[in-house]
Image: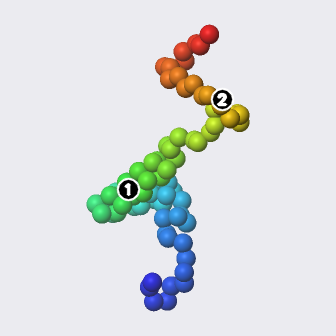
Amino acid sequence: MFAGRSTQAPILVCMNLLQRGLANSFRGLRTGDANLVALGAAMLFVAWWRSSKPSKTRVYKKKLRPGDAVTIRFTSPGAIDS
């Protein structure tokens, strides 16, 4: 890709986005560099976005035999089902 660079993973994958985003934002504020503040804010947003994804956990698992049926009901959170 670039001369003198080995085949490495993309930079955003390797770095701690939260730490680098805070550092860039504060350095941009200290030096008055608006581009650096914007870059830091974008890195902080990506770090927040990656950490806020819902976990993909299974609520219920069961193997069905041929001919069995599944009924799915959607209720409000906290509803007591009797």
Does residue 43 show up? yes
Q: Position of residue 9 (x, y in %)?
A: 54, 72
Ranked by sequence position, the earlier of labels 2 and 1 is 1
What residue sits 50% from the left and 70% below the top? 10
**Circle nearer the viewer, 2 or 1:** 2
Q: Return the residue at label 1.
A: 42
What residue sits 36% from the left and 61% below the top? 39
Mark sitting on residue 68: 2
User: Neighbour class for label 2 at 10 Å: few (<14), some, many (≥20)?
Assistant: few
- Quadrant of the image for the C terminus? top right
Q: Secondary structure at mark 1?
A: helix
Q: Nearer the viewer, residue 30 or 54?
A: 54
What residue sits 62% from the left and 39% below the top? 57
Above or below, 60 against 41 in this view is above
Does residue 30 show up? no
Q: Position of residue 27 (x, y in %)?
A: 40, 61
What residue sits 71% from the left and 34% below the top? 65
